[in-house]
Amino acid sequence: MTDFFTRITKRLNELGVNIDERELAHMAKQCGAGRDALQLTEDLLTVIATRKMERKIATLRKFSRIPVSKRLEDFDFAFQPSIDKQYVARLATLGFVHEGENILLAGDPGCGKTHLAIALAEECLDHGMRVYYITMGDLAMKLLQAKADDKLARVLSNLMRPDLLVIDELGYDRMGVDAAELVFKLISARYERKSIIITTNYQISQWPEVFGSAALTQVIADKFIHHAHVINITGKSYRLRNVK
Ligand code: ADP
Ligand code: MG
């Protein structure tokens, strides 16, 4: 019986109900609850906790703006031998998120950067963490718009909320120094606190072309790379795998 009281109390506490084992034992005794009643209680609480988590994850998934679901299980590591599967598997245990570390996924188009970034983001969602996906082009526009509307502080503080921010496609759009400065603000704000994954088909040495300023590139790259896991993918495009 004590085992039941321990487990039921634990579940109730997880669900935010403040009760201790003695209180529970007392209640069970008062209504003469036997093993069956306690088993039913435990099972029901498990169902409630599971449903609650499912609802939370569904909401977080919607909020994440992930454009299309990608899972790690569906990634063919054999096709892309330049990626260390064990290293990615370790990242998928999400220590990097707890530590506020970043990930840079670099490589040619079609080599799986977005797939891996989203797959890691989905691992976070599975664990009830907050995730937000945005392309670098949209991020630059969002920040410029926020500044123009005098809402920069609010937008930056919203972008601090996700445990993991995925910034996809650095390099597809060139940006002006104004936008690069705002991106720097965001990267600085999250520095050593909250994780960012950036995907890019540009070498860091080419980033000045993207950000339009060597000086800004230096400070952005410096902050971003300081605690970053860098994955350089040197393989072929998966999209073109059947093209001879
Ligand atoms: P990138 O972002 O590097 O341009 P994507 O991640 O968008 O490339 O990959 C292109 C398409 O190929 C996506 O549909 C992705 O799911 C798929 N893909 C890429 N690499 C792999 C892989 N190694 N195994 C399975 N699917 C892959
Ligand atoms: Mg991509």
Image (cartoon, rainbow, N blue to C red):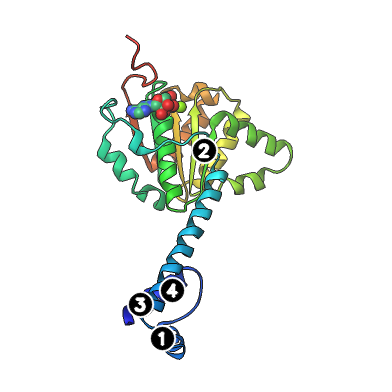
Q: Position of residue 139 (x, y in %)?
A: 58, 34
Q: Label 3: few (<14), some or many (≥20) within 10 Å?
A: some
Q: Position of residue 133 (x, y in %)?
A: 52, 38
Q: Residue at x 25, y 40 (%)?
A: 86
SS under mark 3:
helix
Label 1 or label 2, whichever lies nearer to me, is: 1
Q: Label 1: few (<14), some or many (≥20) within 10 Å?
A: some
Q: Tell which of 174 and 23 is nearer to you.
A: 23
The earlier-in-sequence mark between 2 and 3 is 3
Q: Quadrant of residue 239?
A: top left
Alpha carbon of mark 2 to alpha carbon of mark 4: how far? 37 Å
Alpha carbon of mark 3 to alpha carbon of mark 1: how far? 9 Å
The three-letter code of the residue at mark 1 reads Ala
Q: Which residue is mark 1?
A: 25
The three-letter code of the residue at mark 3 reads Phe
SS under mark 1:
helix
Task: Verify CB contact (< 8 Å) between mark 2 and mark 3.
Answer: no
Q: Which residue is mark 2?
A: 66
Q: Which residue is mark 4?
A: 41
Task: Kindly identify which numbered label has been placed on residue 4.
Answer: 3
The earlier-in-sequence mark between 1 and 4 is 1
Q: Tell which of 239 and 186 is nearer to you.
A: 239
Residue at the top extreme, as displayed: 244
Q: Label 2: few (<14), some or many (≥20) within 10 Å?
A: some
The three-letter code of the residue at mark 4 reads Thr
The earlier-in-sequence mark between 1 and 2 is 1
Alpha carbon of mark 4 to alpha carbon of mark 3: how far? 9 Å
